[in-house]
C-alpha cells in the first residue's frame, strides 16, 4: 500500500485526489498540507479521506510523518515546487510535482541532484501524454509512416479573462515564473519534445496583448530549428477565443494531427498537388490509429497510475524530472530569444543569466503591473 501526501490543496490537487482515490487497493492519502489548512479540512470531509492528517507546513508534515509517506504530490504554485520537492526527496519521499517542474533550470538541477542523492524518484506532471489521441500521434510518428517530419505546428491556444491574473500568485515573474509560454504551453512543449526531441535553436517574440494586470506575457510565437532543415512553430496564448489547440505534423509523405486528421498529397508531373490524394497511405494511417488499444486510464489518473506502478515495481515512471527539465529548457530558450531578440542555441549553460530565477527576472520584459491579489476564486478550473 503506497502512502500518499498532497502539498497544496487547491484546484489542480482535486485531479490528484480523485486519481489516488480511484486506486484504493494500491494507495491511500495519509496527509494533506496547505498554508490554508481549512482547504485540507474541506477536502478531507468532501472525499471522506478519514485517515488523512492535516498540516500547514510541509516541513512539519515530513518531520511528524517520518517514514509514513511514500510519495508526495506537489500542487503548490510554481515558485515553491523546487523547495518542497528537495525537502521531500531529502526526507526519503518520492515526489510528483505539478507542471511547470520549477521556475528555472538551476532549480531543476537542484531537484535532480536531490533525486540522485536520495535514491528516490522525481516525476513531473505532463498528463496530456495520457490522452488517446496524443498517444496515438506519438505512435504514428514513431512508425515512420509519414516519412521525415518537415514542419510541426503547435497551437497552444487558450483563453483566460482579465481576472485570471488577479489570483495572488499568478501574473508575476517571481511567483508564477512566467506567462502562458511557461504555464499553458508547457503541456504542448512537453508533447512536442516527446515526439520530436529538442531543437537546436530558437527565435521568438513575446508580448502581452491584452492582460493589462499581468507582468508576464499572454502571447508568444516561437520558431524552433531542428537538424536537417525541419522547423516547428509554437504559439503560446491565453488570448484565443475557442481554445482550438492543435499539434500538426507535416511529414514528407502525409500530414497528421491532433485532433486526428490525415492528408496525403500526390504530386502531378509539374510538382503541383493532384486533385486526388494518396488514399492508400491515408487508409493505412487511419487503420494504424484504429488498431491502437485505448489507454486504460487517462490524463492525471493515467499518469499517477503510471507513477504507482513504477513505485510498486521499483522502476522509473514514464515522465521524469529529466522530461520536466527539458521542457523548462526549451521554454527558457523562448524567453531568452524573445527578450534578447536573438537566436538562442541550446543547451542553456549554467553561466547563462537565464539559468537562474534572478537572471530571468532581471532580464525579461515587465509588461504591466499586477493590480489585484485575490486569495482564492470559487468555481472549477479546466485543464
Ligand atoms: N496539470 C495541469 O493541467 C494544471 C492545471 C492547473 C494548474 N496546474 C499547476 O498546479 C499548480 C497549482 O495550481 P492551482 O491552479 O491548483 O493553484 P491554486 O492556487 O488553486 O492552489 C495552490 C494551493 O497551494 C497552496 N500553497 C501555496 N504555497 C504553499 C506552500 N508553501 N505549502 C503548502 N501549500 C501551499 C495554496 O494555499 C493553494 O491552496 C501550479 O503549479 C499550476 O501550474 C496544473
Image: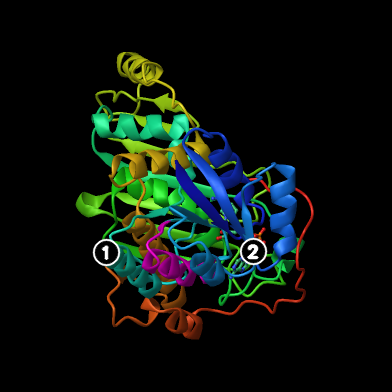
Determine the main secondary structure of the stretch shown in magenta: helix
Q: Position of residue 258 (x, y in %)?
A: 47, 34
Quarter of the picture containing the N terminus is top left
**Label 1: how many Cα within 10 Å (few below 14, some 14–19, many 20+):** few
What colour scheme has been applied to the protein in the rendered image? rainbow
State left or right for residue 91 relative to residue 366.
Answer: left
Specify few, some or many for label 2: CA neighbours under 10 Å numbering under 14, 14-19, or 20 or more: many
Element at badge 1? helix
Pick the front one: 37 or 359: 37
Q: How far, Cα to Cα, is label 1 from label 2?
A: 27 Å
- Return the mark for residue 223: none
In magenta stretch: residue 110 = no
Q: Which residue is at the front of the view, 48 or 337?
A: 48
> SS for tag 2?
loop
Measured along the vertical axis of the image, is residue 120 above or below residue 133? Answer: below
Marker disc for residue 34: 2
Q: Of the two numbered discs 1 and 2 on the same chain, state the one appearing first in sequence.
A: 2
Query: Assess mark 2: CB under 8 A from ligand 1?
Result: yes
| Residue located at (61% from left, 63% from top) | 218
What residue sits right under mark 1 in the picture? 116
Amino acid at each position: 500500500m503506497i502512502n500518499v501526501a498532497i502539498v497544496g490543496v487547491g484546484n489542480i490537487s482535486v485531479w490528484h485526489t480523485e486519481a489516488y482515490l480511484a486506486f484504493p487497493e494500491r494507495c491511500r492519502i495519509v496527509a494533506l498540507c496547505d498554508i490554508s489548512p481549512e482547504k485540507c479540512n474541506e477536502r478531507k470531509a468532501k472525499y471522506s479521506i478519514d485517515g488523512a492528517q492535516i498540516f500547514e507546513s510541509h516541513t512539519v508534515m515530513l518531520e511528524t510523518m517520518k517514514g509514513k509517506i511514500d510519495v508526495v504530490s506537489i500542487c503548490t504554485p510554481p515558485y515553491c515546487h523546487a523547495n518542497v520537492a528537495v525537502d521531500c526527496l531529502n526526507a526519503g519521499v518520492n515526489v510528483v510535482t505539478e507542471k511547470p517542474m520549477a521556475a528555472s533550470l538551476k532549480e531543476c538541477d537542484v531537484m535532480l541532484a536531490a533525486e540522485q542523492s536520495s535514491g528516490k524518484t522525481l516525476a513531473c506532471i505532463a498528463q496530456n501524454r495520457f490522452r488517446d489521441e496524443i498517444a496515438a500521434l506519438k505512435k504514428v510518428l514513431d512508425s515512420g509512416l509519414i516519412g521525415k517530419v518537415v514542419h510541426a505546428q503547435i497551437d497552444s491556444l487558450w483563453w483566460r479573462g482579465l481576472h485570471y491574473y488577479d489570483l495572488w500568485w499568478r501574473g508575476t515573474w517571481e511567483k508564477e515564473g512566467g506567462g502562458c509560454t511557461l504555464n499553458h504551453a508547457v503541456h504542448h512543449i512537453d508533447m512536442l519534445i516527446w515526439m520530436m526531441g529538442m531543437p537546436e535553436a530558437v527565435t521568438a517574440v513575446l508580448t502581452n496583448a491584452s492582460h493589462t494586470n499581468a507582468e508576464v506575457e499572454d502571447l508568444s510565437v516561437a520558431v524552433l530549428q531542428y537538424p536537417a532543415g525541419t522547423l516547428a512553430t509554437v504559439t503560446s496564448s491565453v488570448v484565443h477565443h475557442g481554445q482550438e489547440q492543435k499539434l500538426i505534423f507535416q511529414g514528407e509523405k502525409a500530414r497528421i494531427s491532433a485532433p486526428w486528421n490525415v492528408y496525403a498529397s500526390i504530386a502531378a508531373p509539374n510538382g503541383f498537388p493532384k486533385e486526388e490524394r494518396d488514399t492508400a497511405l491515408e487508409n493505412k494511417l487511419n487503420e494504424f490509429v484504429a488498431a491502437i488499444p485505448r489507454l486504460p486510464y487517462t490524463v492525471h489518473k493515467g499518469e499517477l497510475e503510471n507513477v504507482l506502478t513504477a513505485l510498486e515495481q521499483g522502476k522509473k515512471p514514464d515522465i521524469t524530472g529529466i522530461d520536466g527539465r527539458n521542457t523548462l529548457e526549451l521554454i527558457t530558450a523562448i524567453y531568452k530569444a524573445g527578450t534578447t531578440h536573438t537566436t538562442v542555441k541550446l543547451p542553456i549553460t549554467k553561466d547563462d543569466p537565464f539559468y537562474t530565477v534572478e537572471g530571468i527576472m532581471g532580464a525579461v520584459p515587465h509588461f504591466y503591473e499586477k493590480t489585484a491579489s485575490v486569495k482564492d476564486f470559487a468555481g472549477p478550473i479546466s485543464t
